[in-house]
Image (tube, rainbow, N blue to C red):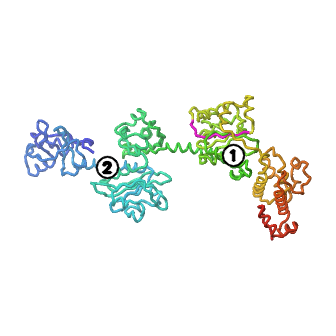
Amino acid sequence: MKLREIKIISSVVLSPEQTVREVAGIFLKHQVDGAPVVDKGGKIIGLFTKDQIYRLLHEELNPHTLVVDLMIPEYKIGHLDDELEDMLNDEFEWLPIVDDNQVIGMITRNNLSKVFFDFYREISCELETIINSTYNLIVSVDEEGKIKVFNKSAEKFLGMEAKEMKGKNVAEVFPDSGLAEVVRTGKVELLQKVKLNNNYYISNRSPIIKDKKVIGAVAVIQCISEMEKISRELETVKDLNEELQAIIESSFDGLYVTDGNGLTLRLNKAYERITGIKADKFLGRYVDDIINDGIVSQSVTTLALQQKETVSIIQEYQAGKTTLATGNPVFDKKGNIFRVVCNVRDITELNQLNKELEKARSLSQHYQNQLRSMRYSVSDKLVVKSDKMRDFLELVIRLAQVDSTILITGESGTGKEVIAETLYSNSNRRDGPFIKINCGAIPENLLESELFGYEHGAFTGASKEGKAGYFELANGGVLFLDEIGELPLNLQVKLLRVLQSKEFVRVGGGKPLKIDIRILAATNRNLREMVAKKEFREDLFYRLNVIPVNVPPLRERKEEITAFVTHFMLMFNRKYKLNKRITPEVVDLFLRYDWPGNIRELENLVERLIVISSGKFITINDLPAHIRGGSQNNLNGVHVSGIIPLKDAAESAEKQVLERAYAEFRTIRQVAKTLKVSAATVVRKAAKYGITQNYEA
């Protein structure tokens, strides 16, 4: 603080020719106790104070004695650019103030001391407000490691009162704080993880240096889960500026300080980092001018000055950052605002996280809907027993490695969705989302908003936050459009545009959104015939049909029926907590049936038979008539499909007989007795054909 910043208490000057009597009258008139003596050119030549008047009276001198005879010829002079703190270190009682060799007034040492301490009281108040306006814990120690400052956030988070903590050695209270090490080394330690009272925090620790000597250390501590307000006390006035600087620059939040007129006084590095704007754009400028330049959307300082209370607003910066700003007015003893301290927190990432949360919620809801409809996992669905299906699966695995659009065709119930899941789970997108949409299951008036999402206010009843569509949710992964042949023509145009440009626009929106997805489509309809009938766009068909994959019907791979039956029996027995068995005669009929509904028909039939059959075994009598047909002949005999070598036929018959016996009798002894062989033969034959069952001996 310079002398020009304080009020000069007296501008009275004396001439050397004036008498002591005249001076006494001047002192009484102006209520002063001293004044400088100047020559005719205005240059100071001495001092005359009330002490010289007392001397004249004591020595009984003539009151008409001239000032020049009693004035003090030796004196110290102050200049307007002198530092107040430096002046207090010198010995003087009266201090004439000179500007360009002209005396402009005089102040006393007592006046200077009062101004000095009033100034630091204001700074102390400012510092306390800054500390209480931030979100972090503050702890400082002196050079002996004794706690000097323990703010309110520290009290709140650590559960200890400041009055109990002050004076204690920090190593005894918080051995992991690291402050003692900072005092010893004098090194700054940033982003250190510490454990206090069984909680984890991030700590920035800085030494407090005065006259090149470490006199303490300060820690600004941030709770990992939440930013807390910074609070701070100073132990002594002499250490105020050093501790203030250490605290401000260690803060995780931006701090911005103005005077009572909105003039920018200081800001910290965190403020520059958060806003992306250098300090020279703000310092020494009024906040209203900064607003007029368009640097920031609104001034929280101006609002705090106008409302004379703490104000919080959202600010938008020219650099593209969004912040939560809180302006805290600081009042003097007369109730006037002399400082406004603003705390600024970057919420740009928070806004982005909110958007991601919206997307995640939508994705979660979609997956929940999918899980409700799923009765078993993807791996359970895939049953491959024939060479034809093994070759087909190898093709699918190879296609999974590329990113081309695939059109999966096949009859209803053949497992097109399973193939889509297999393509996804074996691709390089398997860590991304897998979104499945049945184009025929969503009402046409909702399908567009479900696929592409919508913005706030897009239509009556729209969510005020808007909603991400399935294309947006599938970004980075795979989108499976089942029953693509049911997609309305107007949406076929939009889908074509997405496939061509990899971007789309939300309903009610105007900004295109880029996406990175792989499209899989499936249908049981003949799209070529639909194209010929103008029911499906030809250009979209060729966009989808980049790599066609046709899933063969069950009647073309009947050798897998037995495996599917076994799989479904296990699954539904487990689901309904039953232990039903199926007789070989039923399996024989299954092998003869053509299954127009394919695997889905077989699955549904097995579930129905397990639920409705009254006995332990599912027999021919439990089957629906269209499957039993006229096949009641030879149902008690064994069956072979076609003409095969006699050895194979004999083994097939032997296996069928064993399976029937195992299904009918509870013990190996009963099986052996009925088949008229030894128990050892039954066990050996069963092991040969892979027939297993828990039997009693």
Q: Which x, y percent locates residue 243? A: 34, 53
> Is-magenta flag for residue 518?
yes
Question: Mark 2 belongs to which amino acid?
Answer: Tyr
Badge number at residue 358: none
Placement of the N terminus among the 4 image quadrants: top left
Indicate whether 495 appears above or below 596: above
Discs 2/1, front: 1
Task: Tell me the quarter of the picture where residue 235 sits.
Answer: bottom left
458 left or right, relative to 324: right
Q: Residues within 10 Å of mark 2 (few under 14, many from 20)?
A: some
> Is-magenta flag for residue 107?
no
Instruction: Considering the whole magenta stretch, tell me its main secondary structure.
Output: strand
Disc 2 is placed on an element classified as: helix
Badge number at residue 419: 1
- Check disc 2 and report the residue beneath it: 120
Q: Which x, y percent locates residue 539? A: 66, 30
Question: Mark 1 belongs to which amino acid?
Answer: Ile
